[in-house]
Image: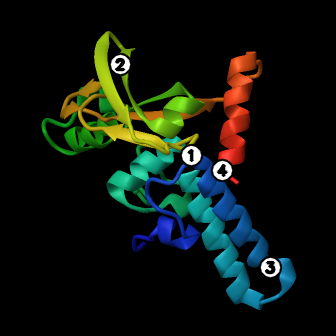
Amino acid sequence: MANKDYYNILGVAKNSSPDQIKKAYRKLAHEHHPDKGGGKEAEAKFKEINEAYQVLSDPQKKIAYDQFGSSDFASGNSGGFSGFNTQGFDFSQGFGGGFGDIFDSIFGQAMSQLQVEVEITVAQAVLGETLHLQLDGKAIDLTIPPGTADGQSFILRGKGRAYRGGIGDLIITTRVRIPRHLSKEARELYEKLKHLER
């Protein structure tokens, strides 16, 4: 099956947040729902939209798609091994540098991806800041730019888990912490900001 551009299908950028992907999907699913007519063409488009969302909304499938393409997600295979039958194979023995190494490399690379979420304040999201993090015993510096959105992800190459082929990537997703209780001074600052943005 030819590769499909799921990002293009949903009309989103590769670095779009999960919320942006969900919003785009809902809009397109509403527009192209078969109940609105359009026959087989509308059904095909609706199926394609759903296929794209099923992959891009799942972090693990999204990582595999970004690395290996759409392959055969539509048939339920996340790695693109369409029709491959593992019955009778003992993967624990390896294949002496053959298919076993390829299998281990592909899935080892996918599993080496490390995904974490970090909370940031509204001020950090608006103004930007360098965060000093401790992850798996490693010191990580993440510079978030001004205007960082809730759910925005940053990829740090070679900062994930180790596997036979090297070290995977670290994906950090920011979550903006909205304060539930404000001091008098903080409330006054937010009030001023609200008026300035009008």
Q: Earlier in the sequence, mark 2 or mark 3?
A: 3
Mark 1 or mark 4: name the one nearer the start of the chain. Answer: 1
How many angstroms separate mark 1 from mark 3 (CA)? 24 Å
Residue tagged by mark 4?
A: 197
Say which of marks 2 and 3 sits in front. 2
* 3 vs 4, front mark: 4
The residue at which mark 3 appears reads as: 34
Picture quarter containing residue 88?
top left
Kindly identify the amino acid type of the residue bearing the numbered disc 1: Asp
Q: State whether residue 113 is above or below residue 36.
A: above
Could you give the CA–CA distance between mark 2 and mark 3, rounded to whole angstroms? 49 Å
Horizontal and vertical percent position of residue 74: 55, 63
CB atoms of marks 2 and 1 within 8 Å = no
* Mark 1 or 4: the one toward you: 4
Say whether residue 5 is left or right of residue 57.
Answer: left
Measured from the top left, where is residue 198 in percent x and y? 70, 54
Q: CA distance from mark 2 to mark 1?
A: 28 Å
Residue at the left extreme of this rendering: 97
Disc 3 on helix, strand or loop? helix
Q: Secondary structure at mark 1?
A: loop
Of the numbered discs 1 and 3, the one sitting upstream in the chain is 3
Q: Tag 3: Cα neighbours inside 10 Å, few (<14), some, or many (≥20)?
A: some
As drawn, is 39 to the left or to the right of 83? right
Q: Which mark is residue 132?
A: 2
Q: Please tell me which of labels 2 and 4 falls first in the chain.
A: 2
Can residue 113 be seen?
no
